[in-house]
Image (cartoon, helix red, strand yellow):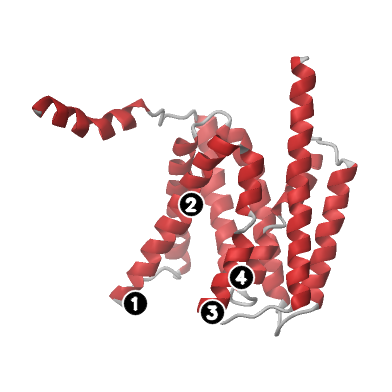
Amino acid sequence: MAGASTSFGDEPYLWLKEKNWKVSRSHLLYLFLLGGIFYMMQSSFYFQAVKYIPSSLAALLLYLNPIFVAIFSFFINKEKLTKHIIIAILISFLGMLLVLGAPEGKIQPLGIALAVGAAIVYSMYIIVGNKVTAHVPPITASAYIALFAALSFFVFGIGSGTLHFQFDAKGWLPIIGTSFVSSVLAMLTFFAGMNIIGPTKAAILSMIEPIVTFLLSMVFLHESISSLQMIGGLIVLSGAMLVVTTKELKLKKKSTSISA
């Protein structure tokens, strides 16, 4: 029994010991870029956006990121914009015209700009992250990204005077819940799920976020959305999904031709 208990107690240590936590200096620089700059900017833009527009609309605009990833890949990685991707981009922008052209309540342009800015930064995060996770284990990358993001927020908050702790003790509960469940746990489970079902299915499943956000915002924040906005939102998600599936088919054809 003693030997069994010792073995059980050593399991977490052995698990941590087996993980490769060391990264090269170049990868460490990219991880700092991902966490300390891109993650910090994307989340800052997003939370600022919900001050001016409904959270459901901000979540929808954030999921323009597959469109921006395709466009950035064209300029940075010299990937071709196929006919299907161009059609998907046009579909998504048509959906955005419906969303923004039929507002339910007042929509401030600054909120739109911040939400789109979050989508653009997140797209850059995805492009750089894809290159880094090809060489760094996902759990190691997640740990460094979270660490650098926390340090960046802390330094910026202290420097700008926006970080303070003068609030009630009950405020810690939503803070801890947001940081652990919505950030750390979400990042780890997304990487773990992606390793099991693949990046395309993971990306498609993650697109239910705007729908969940809309439902929760109706229940807890009493937000509303017009029928035209709802139709436009579905069109935007359809266009983004088409981009993801088209890129996956392209990768499958490339791997098939190489193996042949």
| Chain-order first, disc 3 or disc 1 | 1
Precedes in sequence: disc 2 or disc 1: 1
Distance in Å between CA atoms under marks 3 and 4: 10 Å
In the image, taking residue 152 as reference, residue 129 lies left or right, namely right
Identify the residue under disc 1. 167
Viewer-side label of 3, 1: 3
Mark 3 = which residue?
221
The x and y percentages for residue 190 are: 53, 46
Please provide percent x and percent y for residue 243: 77, 47
Circle 2 SS class: helix
Task: Say what amino acid the circle numbered 1 marks.
Answer: Phe
Q: Residue at x 73, y 75 (%)?
A: 109
Q: What is the total number of numbered labels drawn onto the structure image?
A: 4
Tell me the residue at 56%/40% (across/down): 194
On the image, numbered disc 2 is attached to which residue? 186
**In this view, 19 is above or below 206:** above
Label 2 Cα crowd, 10 Å radius (few <14 / some 14-19 / many 20+): few
Q: Which numbered circle lies on residue 214? A: 4
Above or below: residue 203 compared with residue 235: above
What crowding class fits label 4: few (fewer than 14 Cα within 10 Å), some (14-19), or many (20 or more)?
many
